[in-house]
Image (spheres, helix red, strand yellow):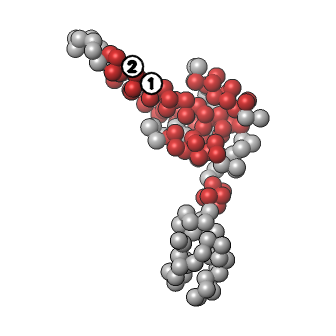
Amino acid sequence: MPFCTQCGNAVRDTDIYCGACGTRQSAGVFGGQSGSQIMSGLSPRTAALLCYVPIVGWIASIVVLAAAKFRTDRDVRFHAFQGLYLFVAWLIVDWVVAPFFSFVPRHMLPVGFILKLAIIGTWIFMLVKTAQEQMFRLPIIGELADRSVAEQK
């Protein structure tokens, strides 16, 4: 149950004004802001950057893909899909490749570790390219992201 932003009394989700003090209430439960208000302050560049934050960027990618604000922005949606597919590559390395190569004798290179470092490096590279507002398509993953954006129309 939400509370008044002024006096702290309980208010209903549908109340526009507090019954106790009369203060106008913001809609929603996200700290007094609705989901659309939170997304309204997010620039397309920032949304694209958040999709490449190592390991947790998948959350931003899903939020961006679900947001009405970016439904028609092909570039932001591309970055969201590419960031999501890059995270899937991380999961494949972490759950499949690294355990498979853990049975190789110790004198061999740690393949799983090297691949994880490569993916982290790719995330950082994409953060830099996106911050400079350069569109960069990763091999294979970029093609998948392009197809996903095209299918959304």
Three-letter residue code for mark 2: Val
Corner quadrant of residue 74: top right
Nearest the eye: 12 or 66 = 12
SS label for mark 2: helix
The residue shown at (55%, 29%) is 85
Query: Mark number for residue 97?
Result: 2
Residue 132, placed above or below residue 20: above
Query: Mark number for residue 92?
Result: 1
Badge 1: residue crowd in 10 Å (few <14, some 14–19, many ≥20): few
Percent of width and height locating residue 96: 40, 21
- Quadrant of the drawing holding the C terminus: top right
**Horizontal side, residue 59 vs residue 135: left or right:** left
**Horizontal side, residue 153 vs residue 96: left or right:** right
Q: Residue 132, can we see it? A: no
Residue 89, placed above or below residue 19: above
Three-letter residue code for mark 1: Ile
Q: Residue 36, can we see it? A: yes
The residue shown at (50%, 40%) is 57
